[in-house]
Image (cartoon, rainbow, N blue to C red):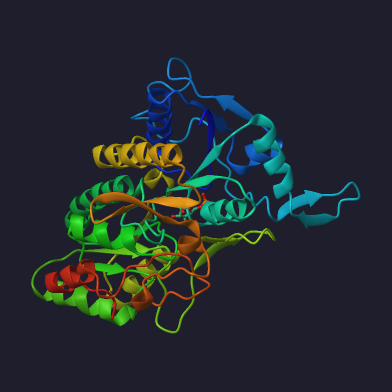
Amino acid sequence: MKKVAILTNGGDAPGLNAVIRAIVKTARTNGVECYGFIEGYKGLLNNNFVKLDLDTNASGLLHRGGTIIGTSNSTNVFNYKVVNEDGTIEYKDLSDKCIENIKNNGFECIFTLGGDGTQKSSRDFSLKGVNCIGVPKTIDNDVAHTDMTFGYNTAVSVATEAIDRLHTTAESHHRVMVLEVMGRYAGWIALESAIAGGADAALIPEIPYDINKVVDKINERRARGKEFSIVVVSEGATPINGNLVIKKKLEDGSGLDNIRLGGIGEVIANEIEELTGMVSRNTTLGYVQRGGTPSAFDRILSTKYGTKAMELALEGIFNVLVTYKDGKMGYVSLEDVVGDNKVIGAASGNTKESNIRKIPLDDDLIRVARDLGMSLGD
Ligand code: F6P
Protein backbone atom coordinates (compact mmCIF):
# COMPACT_ATOMS: atom_id res chain seq x y z
CA MET A 1 0.00 0.00 0.00
CA LYS A 2 1.53 3.27 -1.14
CA LYS A 3 -1.20 5.89 -1.51
CA VAL A 4 -4.46 6.43 0.37
CA ALA A 5 -6.99 9.25 0.70
CA ILE A 6 -9.30 10.53 3.40
CA LEU A 7 -12.60 12.34 3.09
CA THR A 8 -14.75 13.88 5.78
CA ASN A 9 -18.43 14.10 4.95
CA GLY A 10 -21.66 15.22 6.63
CA GLY A 11 -21.97 17.52 9.64
CA ASP A 12 -18.65 18.12 11.35
CA ALA A 13 -17.82 16.66 14.75
CA PRO A 14 -15.06 17.30 17.26
CA GLY A 15 -12.28 14.79 16.69
CA LEU A 16 -12.34 14.75 12.87
CA ASN A 17 -8.89 16.33 12.71
CA ALA A 18 -7.61 13.97 15.38
CA VAL A 19 -8.70 11.00 13.22
CA ILE A 20 -7.03 12.56 10.17
CA ARG A 21 -3.84 13.06 12.19
CA ALA A 22 -3.87 9.47 13.43
CA ILE A 23 -4.36 8.07 9.91
CA VAL A 24 -1.62 10.28 8.48
CA LYS A 25 0.80 9.44 11.29
CA THR A 26 0.19 5.69 11.03
CA ALA A 27 0.55 6.01 7.25
CA ARG A 28 3.90 7.76 7.62
CA THR A 29 5.12 5.14 10.10
CA ASN A 30 4.43 2.58 7.39
CA GLY A 31 5.72 4.53 4.41
CA VAL A 32 2.28 5.32 2.93
CA GLU A 33 1.38 8.67 1.34
CA CYS A 34 -1.85 10.25 2.51
CA TYR A 35 -4.14 12.67 0.69
CA GLY A 36 -7.36 14.44 1.63
CA PHE A 37 -10.32 15.11 -0.66
CA ILE A 38 -11.70 18.61 -0.18
CA GLU A 39 -15.27 18.85 1.11
CA GLY A 40 -16.10 15.18 1.29
CA TYR A 41 -17.66 13.38 -1.66
CA LYS A 42 -17.75 16.69 -3.52
CA GLY A 43 -13.94 16.60 -3.64
CA LEU A 44 -14.04 13.03 -4.89
CA LEU A 45 -16.36 14.09 -7.70
CA ASN A 46 -14.37 17.21 -8.62
CA ASN A 47 -10.99 15.49 -8.23
CA ASN A 48 -10.05 18.11 -5.69
CA PHE A 49 -7.54 16.89 -3.12
CA VAL A 50 -4.41 17.89 -1.21
CA LYS A 51 -1.44 15.97 0.09
CA LEU A 52 -1.60 15.70 3.86
CA ASP A 53 1.83 16.49 5.23
CA LEU A 54 2.61 16.23 8.94
CA ASP A 55 5.24 18.95 8.67
CA THR A 56 2.89 21.50 7.12
CA ASN A 57 -0.89 21.32 6.65
CA ALA A 58 -1.50 18.28 8.85
CA SER A 59 0.34 19.41 11.95
CA GLY A 60 -1.16 20.71 15.20
CA LEU A 61 -4.42 18.87 14.58
CA LEU A 62 -5.11 16.93 17.76
CA HIS A 63 -7.05 19.64 19.58
CA ARG A 64 -8.47 21.44 16.54
CA GLY A 65 -12.24 21.42 15.96
CA GLY A 66 -13.84 21.13 12.51
CA THR A 67 -12.01 19.43 9.66
CA ILE A 68 -9.00 20.79 7.80
CA ILE A 69 -10.20 19.20 4.55
CA GLY A 70 -13.74 20.54 4.78
CA THR A 71 -17.00 18.65 4.56
CA SER A 72 -20.20 18.72 2.59
CA ASN A 73 -23.51 17.91 4.11
CA SER A 74 -25.79 16.77 1.37
CA THR A 75 -23.62 15.36 -1.36
CA ASN A 76 -24.91 12.08 -2.67
CA VAL A 77 -22.82 11.33 -5.75
CA PHE A 78 -25.04 8.34 -6.50
CA ASN A 79 -27.97 10.70 -6.93
CA TYR A 80 -26.38 14.07 -7.54
CA LYS A 81 -28.34 17.24 -8.21
CA VAL A 82 -27.44 18.64 -11.61
CA VAL A 83 -28.88 21.93 -12.87
CA ASN A 84 -29.20 21.79 -16.65
CA GLU A 85 -28.62 24.82 -18.91
CA ASP A 86 -32.37 25.37 -19.28
CA GLY A 87 -32.69 25.51 -15.50
CA THR A 88 -34.27 22.09 -15.12
CA ILE A 89 -33.00 19.88 -12.32
CA GLU A 90 -31.96 16.28 -12.70
CA TYR A 91 -30.51 13.78 -10.25
CA LYS A 92 -27.71 11.72 -11.78
CA ASP A 93 -25.50 8.86 -10.67
CA LEU A 94 -21.99 10.36 -10.95
CA SER A 95 -20.23 7.66 -8.97
CA ASP A 96 -18.32 6.38 -12.02
CA LYS A 97 -16.65 9.77 -12.39
CA CYS A 98 -15.49 9.48 -8.74
CA ILE A 99 -14.16 5.98 -9.35
CA GLU A 100 -12.27 7.23 -12.41
CA ASN A 101 -10.65 9.92 -10.22
CA ILE A 102 -9.69 7.35 -7.58
CA LYS A 103 -8.15 5.04 -10.20
CA ASN A 104 -6.35 7.77 -12.15
CA ASN A 105 -4.73 9.08 -8.99
CA GLY A 106 -3.75 5.62 -7.79
CA PHE A 107 -5.53 5.77 -4.43
CA GLU A 108 -5.59 2.26 -3.02
CA CYS A 109 -7.99 2.97 -0.21
CA ILE A 110 -10.47 5.71 0.68
CA PHE A 111 -11.17 6.43 4.34
CA THR A 112 -14.71 7.75 4.70
CA LEU A 113 -15.19 9.68 7.94
CA GLY A 114 -18.89 10.23 8.47
CA GLY A 115 -22.26 9.14 9.79
CA ASP A 116 -24.84 6.79 8.30
CA GLY A 117 -25.37 8.78 5.06
CA THR A 118 -21.63 8.87 4.39
CA GLN A 119 -21.26 5.16 5.14
CA LYS A 120 -24.12 4.31 2.79
CA SER A 121 -22.21 5.90 -0.08
CA SER A 122 -19.04 4.18 1.17
CA ARG A 123 -20.85 0.85 1.00
CA ASP A 124 -22.07 1.68 -2.50
CA PHE A 125 -18.54 2.49 -3.66
CA SER A 126 -17.38 -0.78 -2.09
CA LEU A 127 -19.99 -2.63 -4.13
CA LYS A 128 -18.44 -1.03 -7.24
CA GLY A 129 -14.97 -2.30 -6.33
CA VAL A 130 -13.45 0.63 -4.42
CA ASN A 131 -11.49 -0.21 -1.26
CA CYS A 132 -13.26 1.78 1.44
CA ILE A 133 -12.84 1.94 5.20
CA GLY A 134 -15.46 3.88 7.15
CA VAL A 135 -14.88 5.65 10.45
CA PRO A 136 -18.06 6.46 12.41
CA LYS A 137 -18.29 10.18 13.05
CA THR A 138 -21.25 11.97 14.54
CA ILE A 139 -22.14 13.81 17.69
CA ASP A 140 -25.46 11.91 17.58
CA ASN A 141 -23.83 8.55 18.52
CA ASP A 142 -26.35 6.80 16.29
CA VAL A 143 -24.18 4.63 14.03
CA ALA A 144 -25.02 0.93 14.20
CA HIS A 145 -22.55 -1.65 15.54
CA THR A 146 -20.35 0.77 17.41
CA ASP A 147 -20.75 1.72 21.07
CA MET A 148 -19.48 5.24 20.57
CA THR A 149 -18.85 7.52 17.65
CA PHE A 150 -16.19 10.19 17.99
CA GLY A 151 -17.50 13.70 18.73
CA TYR A 152 -20.30 12.39 20.90
CA ASN A 153 -18.45 12.69 24.21
CA THR A 154 -17.60 16.32 23.48
CA ALA A 155 -21.22 17.12 22.60
CA VAL A 156 -22.40 15.55 25.87
CA SER A 157 -19.81 17.59 27.79
CA VAL A 158 -20.96 20.83 26.15
CA ALA A 159 -24.62 20.02 26.88
CA THR A 160 -23.77 19.12 30.47
CA GLU A 161 -22.02 22.43 30.99
CA ALA A 162 -25.09 24.19 29.60
CA ILE A 163 -27.31 22.34 32.08
CA ASP A 164 -24.99 23.39 34.94
CA ARG A 165 -25.30 27.00 33.85
CA LEU A 166 -29.07 26.78 33.44
CA HIS A 167 -29.35 25.34 36.96
CA THR A 168 -28.10 28.46 38.69
CA THR A 169 -30.26 30.85 36.70
CA ALA A 170 -33.32 28.57 37.02
CA GLU A 171 -32.89 28.43 40.79
CA SER A 172 -32.39 32.18 41.13
CA HIS A 173 -35.53 33.01 39.12
CA HIS A 174 -37.71 30.06 40.13
CA ARG A 175 -38.11 29.08 36.53
CA VAL A 176 -38.40 25.96 34.45
CA MET A 177 -35.49 25.82 32.04
CA VAL A 178 -35.82 23.70 28.93
CA LEU A 179 -32.67 22.78 27.01
CA GLU A 180 -33.09 21.53 23.44
CA VAL A 181 -30.15 19.44 22.29
CA MET A 182 -29.23 17.79 19.00
CA GLY A 183 -29.15 14.08 18.22
CA ARG A 184 -31.59 13.68 15.33
CA TYR A 185 -33.71 10.58 15.88
CA ALA A 186 -31.65 9.23 18.79
CA GLY A 187 -31.70 10.52 22.35
CA TRP A 188 -28.13 9.76 23.41
CA ILE A 189 -26.98 13.36 23.84
CA ALA A 190 -30.17 14.31 25.68
CA LEU A 191 -30.21 11.40 28.09
CA GLU A 192 -26.51 11.31 28.94
CA SER A 193 -26.30 15.07 29.46
CA ALA A 194 -29.51 14.99 31.52
CA ILE A 195 -27.95 12.37 33.81
CA ALA A 196 -24.59 14.16 33.94
CA GLY A 197 -26.23 17.52 34.61
CA GLY A 198 -28.85 16.27 37.08
CA ALA A 199 -31.88 17.29 35.02
CA ASP A 200 -35.39 16.55 36.29
CA ALA A 201 -36.82 15.38 32.97
CA ALA A 202 -35.41 14.14 29.68
CA LEU A 203 -37.53 13.72 26.56
CA ILE A 204 -36.02 11.49 23.92
CA PRO A 205 -37.19 10.19 20.53
CA GLU A 206 -37.17 6.60 21.81
CA ILE A 207 -39.97 7.34 24.32
CA PRO A 208 -42.90 9.43 23.07
CA TYR A 209 -43.88 11.79 25.85
CA ASP A 210 -47.01 12.96 27.61
CA ILE A 211 -46.44 16.57 28.68
CA ASN A 212 -48.66 16.00 31.72
CA LYS A 213 -46.09 13.54 33.09
CA VAL A 214 -43.43 16.23 32.91
CA VAL A 215 -45.79 18.67 34.59
CA ASP A 216 -46.41 16.11 37.37
CA LYS A 217 -42.66 15.94 37.97
CA ILE A 218 -42.33 19.73 38.12
CA ASN A 219 -45.28 19.99 40.51
CA GLU A 220 -43.94 17.19 42.69
CA ARG A 221 -40.67 19.12 43.00
CA ARG A 222 -42.56 22.31 43.76
CA ALA A 223 -44.42 20.51 46.56
CA ARG A 224 -41.01 19.63 48.02
CA GLY A 225 -39.95 23.27 47.93
CA LYS A 226 -37.94 23.04 44.70
CA GLU A 227 -39.13 26.09 42.83
CA PHE A 228 -37.25 25.32 39.63
CA SER A 229 -36.80 22.44 37.24
CA ILE A 230 -34.57 21.49 34.33
CA VAL A 231 -35.98 19.67 31.31
CA VAL A 232 -33.68 18.37 28.58
CA VAL A 233 -35.34 17.76 25.23
CA SER A 234 -33.89 15.95 22.27
CA GLU A 235 -34.66 17.70 18.96
CA GLY A 236 -36.27 14.47 17.73
CA ALA A 237 -38.61 13.96 20.69
CA THR A 238 -42.30 13.58 19.85
CA PRO A 239 -45.46 13.61 21.96
CA ILE A 240 -47.49 10.40 22.15
CA ASN A 241 -49.49 10.30 18.90
CA GLY A 242 -47.81 13.54 17.82
CA ASN A 243 -45.28 14.64 15.22
CA LEU A 244 -41.72 15.83 14.99
CA VAL A 245 -41.15 19.57 15.15
CA ILE A 246 -39.36 20.51 11.97
CA LYS A 247 -37.44 23.71 11.36
CA LYS A 248 -37.05 23.24 7.66
CA LYS A 249 -37.78 20.73 4.97
CA LEU A 250 -34.97 20.99 2.46
CA GLU A 251 -35.62 20.86 -1.25
CA ASP A 252 -33.38 17.89 -1.76
CA GLY A 253 -34.16 14.92 -3.93
CA SER A 254 -30.78 13.27 -3.42
CA GLY A 255 -32.27 10.66 -1.15
CA LEU A 256 -30.50 11.96 1.94
CA ASP A 257 -32.33 12.98 5.10
CA ASN A 258 -33.86 16.29 4.07
CA ILE A 259 -35.46 17.28 7.35
CA ARG A 260 -33.84 19.80 9.67
CA LEU A 261 -35.20 19.27 13.15
CA GLY A 262 -35.62 22.03 15.70
CA GLY A 263 -38.19 23.93 17.70
CA ILE A 264 -39.51 21.29 20.10
CA GLY A 265 -37.86 23.02 23.09
CA GLU A 266 -39.88 26.18 22.54
CA VAL A 267 -43.09 24.18 22.18
CA ILE A 268 -42.44 22.33 25.43
CA ALA A 269 -41.45 25.46 27.38
CA ASN A 270 -44.71 27.14 26.32
CA GLU A 271 -46.79 24.11 27.28
CA ILE A 272 -45.11 23.82 30.67
CA GLU A 273 -45.64 27.52 31.37
CA GLU A 274 -49.30 27.21 30.50
CA LEU A 275 -49.85 24.04 32.52
CA THR A 276 -47.81 24.93 35.63
CA GLY A 277 -48.08 28.71 35.72
CA MET A 278 -44.30 28.80 36.24
CA VAL A 279 -42.19 31.01 34.04
CA SER A 280 -40.49 28.71 31.54
CA ARG A 281 -37.72 29.45 29.10
CA ASN A 282 -36.16 27.46 26.31
CA THR A 283 -32.51 27.42 25.29
CA THR A 284 -31.62 25.72 22.04
CA LEU A 285 -27.99 24.70 22.28
CA GLY A 286 -27.37 24.32 18.56
CA TYR A 287 -24.04 24.13 16.83
CA VAL A 288 -21.83 24.75 19.88
CA GLN A 289 -22.37 21.02 20.47
CA ARG A 290 -20.43 20.32 17.30
CA GLY A 291 -17.86 23.07 17.13
CA GLY A 292 -14.58 23.58 18.90
CA THR A 293 -11.99 21.46 20.58
CA PRO A 294 -12.64 17.76 21.27
CA SER A 295 -12.64 16.42 24.84
CA ALA A 296 -9.66 14.37 26.00
CA PHE A 297 -11.84 11.25 25.66
CA ASP A 298 -12.69 12.10 22.04
CA ARG A 299 -9.05 12.83 21.21
CA ILE A 300 -8.13 9.35 22.41
CA LEU A 301 -11.13 7.67 20.77
CA SER A 302 -10.44 9.50 17.49
CA THR A 303 -6.80 8.47 17.65
CA LYS A 304 -7.82 4.85 18.24
CA TYR A 305 -10.23 5.02 15.30
CA GLY A 306 -7.66 6.61 12.97
CA THR A 307 -4.79 4.26 13.80
CA LYS A 308 -7.07 1.22 13.54
CA ALA A 309 -8.41 2.40 10.16
CA MET A 310 -4.90 2.65 8.72
CA GLU A 311 -3.92 -0.69 10.29
CA LEU A 312 -6.89 -2.34 8.56
CA ALA A 313 -5.82 -0.83 5.23
CA LEU A 314 -2.32 -2.21 5.71
CA GLU A 315 -3.80 -5.63 6.47
CA GLY A 316 -5.90 -5.41 3.30
CA ILE A 317 -9.23 -5.43 5.15
CA PHE A 318 -11.63 -3.22 3.21
CA ASN A 319 -15.30 -2.40 2.89
CA VAL A 320 -15.67 -2.24 6.63
CA LEU A 321 -16.53 0.28 9.32
CA VAL A 322 -14.07 0.63 12.19
CA THR A 323 -15.91 -0.04 15.44
CA TYR A 324 -15.48 0.53 19.15
CA LYS A 325 -17.26 -2.22 21.02
CA ASP A 326 -16.95 -3.31 24.65
CA GLY A 327 -13.86 -1.13 24.97
CA LYS A 328 -12.07 -2.69 21.99
CA MET A 329 -11.41 -1.50 18.47
CA GLY A 330 -12.65 -3.80 15.72
CA TYR A 331 -14.52 -3.68 12.45
CA VAL A 332 -17.75 -4.76 10.84
CA SER A 333 -18.75 -4.99 7.21
CA LEU A 334 -20.26 -1.79 5.82
CA GLU A 335 -23.15 -3.89 4.59
CA ASP A 336 -23.98 -4.82 8.18
CA VAL A 337 -24.04 -1.16 9.14
CA VAL A 338 -26.11 0.34 6.38
CA GLY A 339 -27.34 -2.52 4.23
CA ASP A 340 -30.23 -4.91 4.48
CA ASN A 341 -28.23 -7.29 6.67
CA LYS A 342 -28.00 -4.85 9.55
CA VAL A 343 -29.19 -5.98 12.94
CA ILE A 344 -29.61 -3.01 15.19
CA GLY A 345 -31.45 -2.30 18.41
CA ALA A 346 -34.69 -4.05 17.50
CA ALA A 347 -35.86 -3.33 21.06
CA SER A 348 -35.78 0.38 20.34
CA GLY A 349 -38.10 0.10 17.38
CA ASN A 350 -35.60 0.41 14.55
CA THR A 351 -36.84 -0.79 11.23
CA LYS A 352 -35.21 -2.12 8.12
CA GLU A 353 -35.40 1.35 6.64
CA SER A 354 -33.78 3.04 9.60
CA ASN A 355 -30.01 2.64 9.85
CA ILE A 356 -29.55 4.50 13.04
CA ARG A 357 -28.79 3.13 16.48
CA LYS A 358 -31.26 4.48 18.98
CA ILE A 359 -31.11 3.98 22.74
CA PRO A 360 -32.39 0.46 23.42
CA LEU A 361 -35.26 0.63 25.88
CA ASP A 362 -33.42 -1.80 28.16
CA ASP A 363 -30.25 0.32 28.17
CA ASP A 364 -28.67 1.11 31.52
CA LEU A 365 -29.11 4.82 30.88
CA ILE A 366 -32.89 4.45 30.91
CA ARG A 367 -32.80 2.34 34.07
CA VAL A 368 -30.50 4.87 35.75
CA ALA A 369 -32.77 7.79 34.80
CA ARG A 370 -35.82 6.01 36.19
CA ASP A 371 -34.01 5.03 39.41
CA LEU A 372 -33.09 8.68 39.89
CA GLY A 373 -36.72 9.69 39.54
CA MET A 374 -36.06 11.58 36.33
CA SER A 375 -39.22 11.95 34.24
CA LEU A 376 -38.92 10.48 30.76
CA GLY A 377 -42.36 11.75 29.90
CA ASP A 378 -44.07 8.36 30.09
O1 F6P B 1 -25.94 14.82 12.71
C1 F6P B 1 -25.35 15.87 13.42
C2 F6P B 1 -26.29 17.01 13.57
O2 F6P B 1 -25.65 18.05 14.27
C3 F6P B 1 -27.63 16.65 14.20
O3 F6P B 1 -27.54 16.51 15.59
C4 F6P B 1 -28.49 17.79 13.71
O4 F6P B 1 -29.85 17.44 13.67
C5 F6P B 1 -27.98 18.01 12.33
O5 F6P B 1 -26.67 17.52 12.30
C6 F6P B 1 -27.96 19.44 11.88
O6 F6P B 1 -27.61 19.44 10.55
P1 F6P B 1 -27.19 20.71 9.71
O7 F6P B 1 -25.70 20.85 9.88
O8 F6P B 1 -27.55 20.34 8.33
O9 F6P B 1 -27.93 21.88 10.24
Q: Position of residue 214 (x, y in %)?
A: 27, 75
Q: Which residue lies furthest to the top in this view?
A: 55
Could one spot residue 337 in this view of the protein? yes
User: Which quadrant of the view contains residue 200?
Assistant: bottom left
x 80%, y 56%: residue: 90
Most extreme residue toward the bottom is: 241
From where the camera sits, is residue 178 visible? no
Rendered position, 303 above or below 267: above
What percent of the width, then of the height, locates residue 196? 19, 55
Q: Please state if 89 lies on the left or on the right of 369 as rendered.
A: right
Rendering coords of residue 106 (x, y %): 63, 31
Residue at image point 29% right, 65% down? 279
For the C terminus, give its image quadrant: bottom left
Image location of residue 75, percent across then percent down: 63, 49
Q: Is residue 256 left or right of residue 370?
A: right
In the image, 240: left or right of 127?
Answer: left
53 or 330, which lies in front?
330
Residue at horizontal 73 percent and vertical 43 percent from the top: 97
Give the vertical position of 107 relative to 269 (above or below): above
* Nearer to me, 235 or 211: 235
Q: Residue at x 65, y 52 (%)?
A: 128
* Residue that protrudes farthest toward the left in the picture: 224
